[in-house]
Image: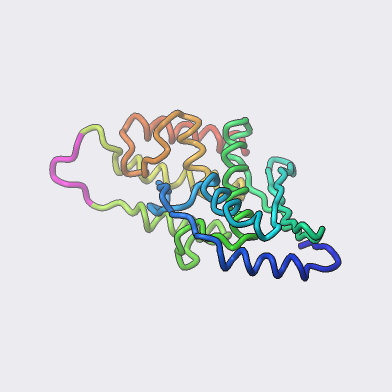
Amino acid sequence: MKKSESIAELAKALAGFQRDVKQPLKDKANPFFKSKYVPLENVVEAITESSAKHGLSFIQYPLNQENKVGIVTILMHQSGEWIESEPIFATPAKQDAQATGSVITYLKRYSLSAIFGITSDEDDDGNAGTHNKQHVDNYNQQNSYQKPPQQPMSDNITAPQIKALKAKLNNVASVNSQEIQLVYVSSLKHLKIDETKGSKDLTKGEASKLINYLASLETQAV
């Protein structure tokens, strides 16, 4: 982390901001972890409602590093004092504008929430930490296949498709050092499938498209 020579005034202002800020409502669904989170626009709104009276403002800018994109957040005070966060990086599931934009939005929300002390995600007790294995374990637990009912709907995703989808998501996320959530959601967006759907809510056709798409990403990574 970088900072100005002194951050005394900034620290006082930030203490006042954190006393006054109203934590935003977690009202957007995360289809991967079946949880709620605060979208970027609500994080920004919560911050700007209280930051100005404390003389606080911020800027964020993107970075590129090989196939990864990153975000840096700078917290500023009217005195001229500042704090610059370390960049955080992630790899888009596909190297196109839509996937890159999704990752940038995701990183901006996390970086901004961290530097201002906004709780933008439900506490999962570390199960969705930075190590990819933890995301894989969480995914497997959330999406463990249970014996279907005697007369399942014929259009529902099948057990073999669930198994294949898990494997493809695991492989693509591991190769790209990326969270499975990002791979899953950005892939749904790319295929124009409802991104609020959990894996078990997919139809056979949607699951087949998603598996084939992830397979193409695996091939590109080789």
Q: Is residue 174 visible?
A: no
Q: Residue furthest left?
A: 150
Question: Residue 19 location in percent, x, y?
Answer: 57, 68
Q: Is residue 220 left or right of residue 73?
A: left
Q: Is residue 103 magenta?
A: no
Image quadrant occupied by the N terminus: bottom right
What residue lies at 33% left-to-right and 37% top-to-bottom? Answer: 202
Q: Is residue 14 visible to the viewer in this orientation of the structure?
A: yes
| Quadrant in the picture for residue 9 | bottom right
For the record, the magenta segment spans 147-153
The quadrant holding residue 130 is: bottom right
> 130 and 58: which one is in front?
58
In percent of width and height, residue 149 lies at: 16, 46
In the rendered view, does 55 fall on the left or right side of 150?
Answer: right
Asked which quadrant contains residue 61, the reply is top right
In which quadrant will I find the C terminus? top right
Q: Taking 91 as reference, is 132 above or below it?
A: below
Front residue of 54/149: it is: 54
Question: Residue at coordinates 64% horizontally, 56% vertically from top-left?
Answer: 51
Residue most extreme to the right: 5
Q: Is residue 175 left or right of residue 77?
A: left
Residue 106 pos. (x, y %): 57, 46
Residue at horizontal 56%, vertical 35%?
Answer: 217
Q: Where is residue 190? Give x, y as percent.
A: 50, 31
Q: Main secondary structure of the magenta part?
A: loop
